[in-house]
Image (cartoon, helix red, strand yellow):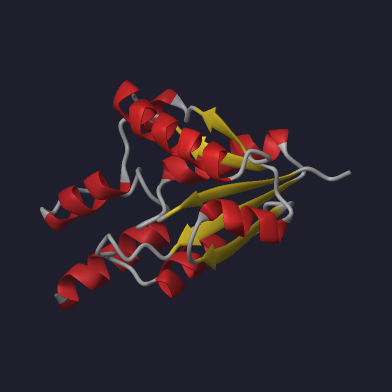
């Protein structure tokens, strides 16, 4: 039986930390579905279509990785995809409290779905999509934090604003 895991998130934008976690998850699971959430509570910098396209480009050539998007509860999406595992990244202790709460909520909603936590490489442990957008808006060089095409897309979008 092939094991399927879902790595859900907003990925706004995709960072090298996200890519690192996708690679780590792929080492454990046969198939990893990277699922872009359409989160109406957040004001995304990039559209769902743009985020999916960036992730597809960032993961091209990674065998066993598929990128898509979803609406609604991630556990419902996991059931539709026949996945039994959710992958979540934990960078710092501050992430753990939120992620632990979400994992317990998801367990309550769907006891057959398990959440595992992966840590990114230490060089990405401070990295967040929110931080990327903030510092790039202030003119910082983010070229070693995101793929080149993501850096260009951020710069282009900031120019248009």
- The quadrant holding residue 107 is top right
Total number of numbered discs in the rendering? 0
Q: Nearer the viewer, residue 79 or 34?
A: 79
Is residue 15 visible in the rendered structure shown here? yes
Residue 29 percent across, percent down from the top left: 73, 39
The correct choice, above or below, for 30 with respect to 80 in the image is above
Q: Nearer the viewer, residue 43 or 56?
A: 43
The correct choice, above or below, for 39 with respect to 159 in the image is above
Residue 7 percent across, percent down from the top left: 56, 47
The correct choice, above or below, for 79 with respect to 104 in the image is below
Could you tell whether 100 is left or right of 68 in the image?
A: left
Q: Residue furthest right?
A: 1
Q: Nearer the viewer, residue 78 or 154?
A: 78
- The quadrant holding residue 111 is top right
Q: Residue furthest bottom?
A: 160
Residue 55 percent across, percent down from the top left: 51, 60
Q: Residue furthest front?
A: 108
Which quarter of the rendered picture does the C terminus lie within? bottom left
**Going 53% across and 29% down the picture, which residue do you hit?**
118
**Going 70% across and 35% down the picture, which residue do you hit?**
27
Could you tell whether 52 is left or right of 93 in the image?
A: right
The correct choice, above or below, for 21 with respect to 67 in the image is above
Could you tell whether 118 is left or right of 44 in the image?
A: right
Residue 15 percent across, percent down from the top left: 40, 48
**Going 49% across and 35% down the picture, which residue do you hit?**
103
Which quarter of the rendered picture does the N terminus lie within? top right
**Going 78% across and 43% down the picture, which residue do you hit?**
3
Is residue 59 visible in the rendered structure shown here? no
């Amino acid at each position: 039986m092939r094991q399927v895991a879902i790595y859900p998130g907003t990925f706004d934008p995709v960072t090298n930390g996200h890519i690192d976690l996708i690679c780590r998850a792929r080492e454990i699971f046969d198939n990893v579905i990277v699922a872009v959430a359409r989160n109406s509570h957040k004001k995304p910098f990039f559209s769902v279509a743009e985020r999916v396209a960036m992730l597809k480009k960032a993961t091209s050539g990674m065998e066993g990785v598929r990128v898509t998007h979803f609406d609604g509860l991630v556990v419902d999406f996991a059931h539709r995809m026949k996945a039994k595992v959710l992958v979540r990244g934990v960078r710092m202790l501050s992430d753990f409290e939120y992620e632990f709460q979400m994992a317990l909520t998801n367990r309550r909603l769907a006891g057959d779905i398990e959440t595992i936590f992966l840590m990114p490489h230490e060089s990405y442990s401070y990295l967040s999509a929110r931080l990327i957008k903030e510092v790039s808006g202030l003119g910082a060089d983010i070229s070693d934090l995101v793929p080149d095409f993501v850096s260009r897309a951020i710069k282009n979008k900031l120019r248009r604003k």
